[in-house]
Structures are given as structure tokens and as C-alpha cells.
Image (tube, rainbow, N blue to C red):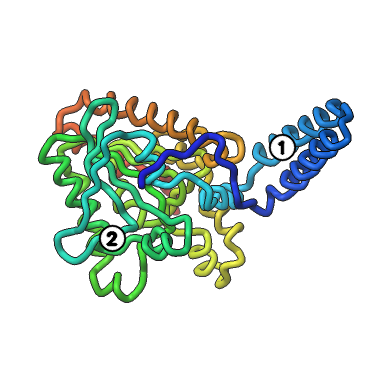
Amino acid sequence: MFGKRSKDFKAQYILEFEKPLRELQKNLDELIVRSQDAKVDISCEIRALEQKIASEERNIFANLSTWQRVLIARHPDRPYSKDYIGNIFSDFQELHGDRLFNDDRAIIGGFAMLNGESIIVIGEQKGRSLSENIECNFGCPYPEGYRKALRLMKLAEKFSLPIITFVDTPGAYPGIGSEERHIAEAIAVNLRDMGRLETSIVSVVIGEGGSGGALGIAMADRVLALENSYYSVISPEGCAAILWKDRKFAPEAAEALQLSPENLLKLGIVEEILPEPLGGAHRNSDAVFASTKEAILRHLKILKKFSPRQLIEKRYARFRNIGIFSEATF
């Protein structure tokens, strides 16, 4: 089901750096229970503890390291693509299969309505339970997932429909089956063909944006990223395994990769950083759905001004101009 997530949804999973907040909240809950049982007024103490919790929360989340942002991007309570589709769009009709091999559940997509306009929406999907994660291959698409996505994109081009994609993957699946079915070729074909699609494309990085697994559905006219997402050529663990020969150096790798949203914006990798509630998108998912929808509509409105040929030319120029380069003389 493509259900709706309430803004009252409470995180069931606590990150290591959030544990001081959990202890304070536990103390507050106990204080409230004691006051009710004893029927005494300790509202001043309760109010003081609530203020302390709010202050500690602001202090923690105002000074997040790059690695801590990566952990929030991976938070298991974070909204996934199905949640965005169920809350931003209406009349979603999922389409299945790549017409060549299989239906990859790590990528979902189909027709939907956005404020009365028909669109194609595609998203990389993770699971919340073990069985869902096995079904979705832990959000790591196979080649058939990218071929399904491209099939849907070409349908969008045929009917002149905008394309919206949601990026959330640690990377494409690198196993034997994936290599046997040519994962590198599938991603490369997506990059080539998305680059020349004659319709507008908006991609939103909602969690993890790992390597070609993310780029395979994000060769877009506009790329937006949530405040606590990351979008990188490699995961911190993969980088640490190569440079430090040990995955335990992932926090150092995250800093070296410059995964912060400010750097993504500075380098022209994304057009906009979408703010999240204090603590992450899972703290108030309704607010995140609303701001994401507003941003998508705003960028689609801009892209409507361009002809198909102009879209292709600007898309090509966008990716050619990414990054900051300098030349050294010897």
C-alpha cells in the first residue's frame, strides 16, 4: 500500500548521538507519571526539563558532523519513496517489469497525478521489515530495475509527461546476478537516454544517493536534495575500504568526500537543498511532503518554459559544468 505517514509518527530507532535526548525524555515521562500518581503540581519542574530537552536538541542537531548526517539519511524511520508517492501524488498506477527479464522491486514507478496534471513518478525503494528489505534487495537495484525505469521514462516522453524521480539507494547491487545481466551497461544506457529525453525531469534525493545507483535515475534537469541526505560518487564505507583499507574509517571518509549539502550546492550538483524538521524528515514527515511537493511544482513550472530541444541542451550543459576546476602551471 502507498499509505500516508502522520506527522505524529514517532521514531522507533535511536541513533547513538541522540541517546542523551532519549534519557532526558525518559526522565520527563517518569516525572509526568509521578506527578499524576501523587496528584501534586510540579509543572515548573516539568517545564524546566522540557526546556532543557529543547535546548539539548537544538545543540545536537545544529552541530551535526557529515557522518551524523549520513546516519540520519539512513534512518530506518525516514520516509521512503512509497511514502512520498502516497502523500504527494494521487491516482498512482504502478507499472511492473522491464519487458526483458523481471520486475525489480527496488525501483517502483508508474503514472500518477500531481495537482491535476499527469506525470510519471519513479522511486528507489527500501523496506522497513526484513521481508520487505529482501523483496526490495535493501534498496539496491538490479539491471532490470534501471531498464524498467527507462521504459517508464520513454512512456513519459511519448505522451509529453514530466518525470519525477526519488533517489534513495546505497548503490546498485554489485553481485554476480547483477553483473551477469550487465548492471554497468544498464546504468550507462539510462544516462545516455535520459540525457536526450524530450521532456522535463526533476529528481529528489530523499536519503542515500550512492554512486551510479543514484545517478541511473537522476540524469535530470533539476536535482533537489533533502537537508539530511547525501549524494556521492561512493559510499563512505566504500571510500574507507579503498583509502584506509578499513570500513571503520567511514566517518573520516564522509568528511573527505565533502558530503554536506552546502558542498553539493556550491559545486552545482544540486539546484536546491530542501530543509527538514529538527532531527530529520521522520520527525514530521507531513511537513517534508508538503515542502517537497512545493519545490517539485516550482521547478516544473520553470521547466515548462523551455522547448524539448532547449531542455536537452540545458541538461547537457548542466552536467558538463558540474564542479570547480583549477589549472596548475609547472
In this picture, residue 135 sits left or right of residue 48 = left
Identify which residue, 178 or 95, lies in the foreground.
95
Identify which residue, 48 or 206, lies in the foreground.
48
Q: Position of residue 55 (x, y in %)?
A: 75, 33
Name the residue beneath numbered marker 2. Answer: 104
Name the residue beneath numbered marker 1. Answer: 59
From the viewer's perspective, is residue 216 above or below residue 26? below
Residue for point 28% across, 26% down: 115
* Three-letter amino acid code of the residue under disc 1: Asn
In this picture, residue 60 sits left or right of residue 289 = right
Q: Position of residue 57 (x, y in %)?
A: 70, 37
Identify which residue, 10 or 33, lies in the foreground.
33
Residue for point 32% across, 76% down: 176
**SS at circle 1:** helix
Image quadrant assignment for residue 300: top left
Q: Position of residue 312 (x, y in %)?
A: 19, 38
User: Which mark sits nearer the N-terminus, 2 or 1?
Assistant: 1
In this picture, residue 65 sits left or right of residue 90 = right
